[in-house]
Amino acid sequence: MSEQYSLQTKLLHNEHKVDQATGAVSVPIQHASTFHQFDFDTFGTYDYSRSGNPTRDALEAAIAELEGGNHGFAFASGMAAISTAFMLLSKGDHVVLTKDVYGGTFRLVTEVLTRLGIDHTFVDMTNLAEVAAAIRPNTRVLYMETPSNPTLNITDIHGVVSLAKEHECLTFLDNTFLTPALQRPLELGVDVVLHSATKFIGGHSDVVAGLAVTKDEELGKKLAFLQNSFGAILGVQDVWLVLRGLKTLHVRMEHGEKGAQQIAEWLLGVPEVKRVYYPGLKDHPGHELQKRQAEGFGAVLSFELENEEAVRRFVEHVKLPVFAVSLGAVESILSYPAKMSHAAMPKEEREARGIRDGLLRLSVGLEKPEELMADFKAAFAHVRGKVEHL
C-alpha cells in the first residue's frame, strides 16, 4: 500500500481491504487445514495451515505494515508470541529485562527459561547506566516494556537500542499498551516488536491473540521457522476478529487516551488516592521522553489507594468498569495487579517494583469520562466510610 497514507487511513485501506476474487470488503475466513497441490513437483503457496493460511497472512501483513516492518506473525496469545521470540535464544544466553515487566513474562523468564539454561537480570530500565552495567558477554537480548505494566514507567527506547548495538544484542519490545497507533518501535531501531493483540488491537474482549513483527530479513526467517516449529498459531476465526478490531483501533485509542488524561488529572485531587501513574501527567518522570518517542500516552493508568481493604471497598461499589483481568477493550476494565496480572510474582518482588496491595490499574474504554468519574466518586465515598450524594 502507498506510504502516502497515514496510519489512521492504512487501518482501513490496505492490500486486503477487498477480496480480489469476489469483491468482498471483509477478509474471507479460510478454514482449510490442508491444501490440494496441483503439481507433483511444485507445491503452491499453501500446503498446511500451521505453516501458512491466507486469512492469517492478511493479519500478519497488516500488522507488519502498521509497525513499519517486513515480517508479521500471528500467535495464539501474547505469551505465545513472547515465548516464541525467546526461543531465538540458546542455552547459556543471558537476557536483561525491565524489572516491572508483565507477570506472565516474569513467570516465563524465571520458571521456564531458567530450566533451559537461559539466565536473566531484571533492571530499572529508566536508568540506562543500570542497563549497561547488567550486560554480560553472553547477553543476547535487551527486553523492554514501555510504558511498563502496571506502573507506567517509560524506557528510553533509542538509548537501549544504542546499548544493544554496542554489545551486539537484540532488542525486544512489548508494545501492547500503545500499539502502532501511538508508538512504532521498529522505527527507533528495535529488532522485534511484540503484542498481546487480546488487548487494544483486538479491542473487544472477545479474542485471545499475539503478534510479533520484525523488519530484519534474517530475523524474519528465524521467527517463521519457530512459528512453524512450535505451532502456536492464531486460528482463522480469531484472526478475523483481530482484523475487525484493527479497523477501529485509531478512534478507540484516541478516545481512550483523552479519557485517561482527564481521569488521571482528576484522581490527583482525590484524597483517597495516594499516587497516580500516567505518563500524560506533566510531573511524570517519563513525560517528556514519551512525547519524543511516541505520539501519545495511551489509555491505561494506575492509581494507588491506602491498602487492600480500601481497594476492596472501592471495587465493591464501583459500577461502570468491568473488574477483570486484561485491558484495552471498548469497556473500561479495572484490574488489581497483585491478584491478576502480576499474581505470578512473589509479594516481595511485586512490592520492590512498586506493585503494592493498594494499586489498581484502569484501562479506559469508550464510556463518557465524566460518567466514569462520577461512578468513581461515589465508590470513593464508600472508601471513606460514608456515602456522598452527587
Image: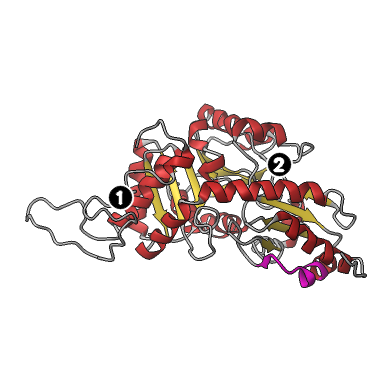
Q: Callout 1: helix, strand or loop?
A: loop
**Residue 317 is inside the magenta segment:** yes
Residue type highlighted by circle 2: Pro
Whether residue 56 is situated above or below residue 286 in the rendered picture: below
- What is the x, y in percent for residue 72? 39, 46
Q: Residues within 10 Å of mark 2 (few under 14, many from 20)?
A: many
Q: Crowding near pointer 1: few (<14 within 10 Å), some, many (20+)?
A: some
Q: Which residue is mark 1?
A: 18
Which region is colored magenta?
A: 313-323
Determine which quarter of the picture holds residue 222: top left
Give me the disc on residue 279. Answer: 2
Would residue 368 be seen by someone viewing this image from the given angle?
yes
Asked whether 23 falls inside the magenta stretch, the response is: no
Q: Reading the chain from its start, which is encountered first: label 1 or label 2? A: 1
Select label 1 or label 2 by which is in front: 1
User: Quarter-wise, where is residue 339 in the image?
Assistant: bottom right
